[in-house]
Amino acid sequence: MNKISASQETDQERSETRRDGIKRFLKAVGLYRVAVYLYSTALNIYAQWRNVLQFLRGVFQNAAYRKTNKGDGLPFPPARMVYLVTNTYTHQWFYDSGIKGTECIRTILKKNNFEIDKFSSILDFGCGCGRIMRHWKNLNGPHLYGSDYNPTLVKWCDSNLHFAEFAVNPLESGFNYEDEKFDFIYAISVFTHLTDEMGLFWIKELGRVLKPKGVMYLTFMGTTRASLLPKELRERFEAGELVVTGAELAGKNTCAAFHPEQYIRNVLAKGLNVLDFVPGGATDAFQDVFLLQKKAHP
């Protein structure tokens, strides 16, 4: 099997080989910088027009959707907010993926003998404009909290999702919550936009506000997303190294962090109990899931 795979190039490897050849040719004739500039300009123009068309299509789709589907009776965020957290303008995808996200959480918790309504206090870290939170509206028992570094999104949640409490968390200075406040925390596609240093800071901060034996549900771009990386970065990922692109824009969607299973077990989640690892378990975000537990006090 290894011999066959070593002798046959994948489509991605052939594409990378062609790109390398074109790059060498352009450099040899002195046109590489010009080509890069023209290519980047064309991509920017295309992206801007594509975004405008997506927005207009989303506006019309959202109007039709709200007429036929009243959903949970809660208001929908403006399309521009939906785009910030989902990269799509459509309320239907926002709503349906939120349902799917809650189902993923319930399923993995139940697999590990936990029930969402048995917790006393729950934190949605990186709550955005309530994609997941809105679906806990009828959850009886737990006190619900949401936190995000974007004050605009937090303000919308605070004004429209009155069954939960919301707060802004600065990107690099932690929560205002007291120690050991929550017994369940979930963060969907949050660590996927953090650098190594910031990820280690936030896992420690989450551990601070989590009760002993409390549980964290965290999603990562890992095994299900590694194929998106170019060959050189993919090799680093496969060697167990955290790979971060766009690190200068940490916290934003343009920063992408790819977490190998080994890195999470040995570095990020060091000191926590790994209860479960489910590749592709977060089907709403197309990401892997780790279920972690804080150890009891000695």
Image (cartoon, rainbow, N blue to C red):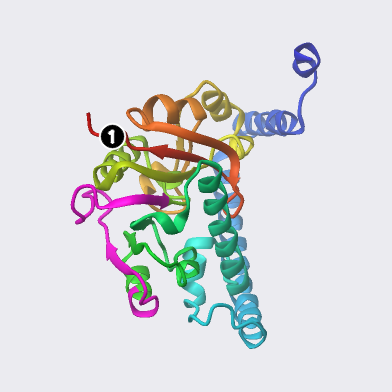
- The type of residue carrying mark 1 is Ala
Q: Is residue 180 magenta?
A: yes
Q: Is residue 207 left or right of residue 14?
A: left
Where does the magenta region start and end? Answer: 158-186
**Picture quarter with the N terminus:** top right
| Residue for point 23% across, 47% down | 180
Q: Is residue 161 left or right of residue 88?
A: left
Q: Is residue 198 magenta?
A: no
Characterize the local packing of mark 1: few (<14), some (14-19) or many (20 or more) Cα atoms within 10 angstroms.
few
Point out the residue furthest to the bottom here: 67
| Residue 118 higher or lower than 212, as above or below | below
Q: Nearer the viewer, residue 272 or 283?
A: 272
The percent coordinates of residue 177 (x first, y second) are: 21, 55
Q: Secondary structure at mark 1?
A: loop
Q: Is residue 1 left or right of residue 190?
A: right
**Picture quarter with the C terminus:** top left
Point out the residue furthest to the top here: 3
| Residue 158 higher or lower than 267, as above or below | below
Q: Does any portion of residue 31 appear in the rendered image?
A: no
| Residue for point 44% across, 65% down | 133
Q: Does any portion of residue 53 appear in the rendered image?
A: yes
| Residue for point 59% across, 51% down | 38
Q: Which residue is the site of mark 1?
A: 296
The percent coordinates of residue 93 (x first, y second) are: 62, 67
| Residue 251 higher or lower than 240, as above or below | below
The percent coordinates of residue 32 (x first, y second) are: 58, 38
| Residue 207 higher or lower than 177, as above or below | above
The percent coordinates of residue 215 (x first, y second) are: 39, 44
